[in-house]
Image (tube, rainbow, N blue to C red):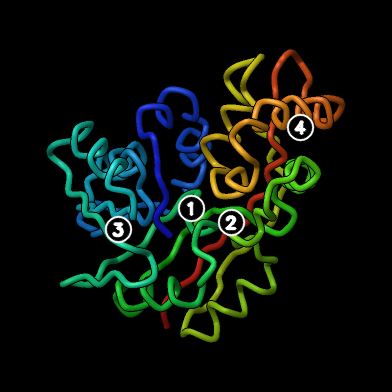
Amino acid sequence: MSKGWDAGLYESDHAFVWKYGADLLPLLNPQPGERILDLGCGTGRLTAEIAATGVETLGIDSSADMIGQARQNYPKLKFQLADARTFNVAEPFDAVFSNAALHWVPDARAAIQSVYRALKPGGRLVAEFGGKGNNQKVIAALKEAGASDPLLTFYFPSIGEYSGLLESEGFEVRFATLFDRPTELEDPVRGLEQWLVMFQQKALAAIPAESREKAFRQMEDRLRPELFYDGKWHIDYRRIRVVAARI
């Protein structure tokens, strides 16, 4: 699950990750006095928004750089380095929240089992992550440019697939939806390249360093007709959003 992250670049050029995730908070509906775990907390932005509602929070992430930045951003909140597949908690939580993290965990069953262990009976999972068809256009361009298949790294399930996994591990699915969410990038010139460097490191590793610039230009030419509009680059995100309860 772990990957090399530049937490500073993540915060400066890819703030859309946590900004879009704020739309998920009404589904979480945190109540004062609850204990909520933020799985894949990144730099802690949404952990802090949840904590501001009067709940006790714990943010966990598999990236030491992200956890370090989160602790720097919010020194009064609790953050721990942990893996979604194997983490354990001393005391169960009322809810587990996760934004833009679970698609980084191909072993989805192990992550679901960890979440189950972390919840009280009746506790809820509220999550959003990449769903079936996510980044389809970008993935095709990457493969044409000589990158390895990103789907070897990511997990983009359908609603049926993910709901079935949850139910097989003791959850009741209360809500699930799959939707398109084209996402505007910050830099109108280098936005696509910056996104690829941040989120597609493993796929790009298959392209020799001396050929990388040529590959970026090739992908830009391939994707510009579909993903560059209104003066900005956009990424073809598809998201799955789910609410489930431990039974």
Q: CA distance from mark 1 to mark 4?
A: 37 Å
* Classed neighbour count for the residue bearing mark 2: other residues with Cα under 10 Å, few (<14), some (14–19), many (≥20): many
Q: CA distance from mark 1 to mark 2?
A: 10 Å
Query: Which amino acid, by three-letter code, is at mark 2?
Result: Arg
Query: Which amino acid, by three-letter code, is at mark 3?
Result: Leu
Q: Which mark is residue 37?
A: 3
Query: Which amino acid, by three-letter code, is at mark 1?
Result: Leu
Q: CA distance from mark 2 to mark 3?
A: 17 Å
The quadrant the N terminus occupies is bottom left
Disc nearest the viewer among 1 and 3: 3
Give the percent coordinates (x, y) of residue 52: 25, 39
Q: Is residue 80 above or below residue 243?
A: above
Q: Which mark is residue 27?
A: 1
Between 153 and 133, which is closer to the camera in this rendering?
153
Give the percent coordinates (x, y) of residue 211: 67, 32
* Classed neighbour count for the residue bearing mark 3: other residues with Cα under 10 Å, few (<14), some (14–19), many (≥20): many
Q: CA distance from mark 2 to mark 4?
A: 29 Å
The residue at which mark 4 appears reads as: 219
The quadrant the C terminus occupies is bottom left
Between 12 and 169, which is closer to the camera in this rendering?
12
Q: Are marks 4 and 3 in contact (CB under 8 Å)?
A: no
Disc nearest the viewer among 4 and 3: 4
Under circle 1, the secondary element is helix
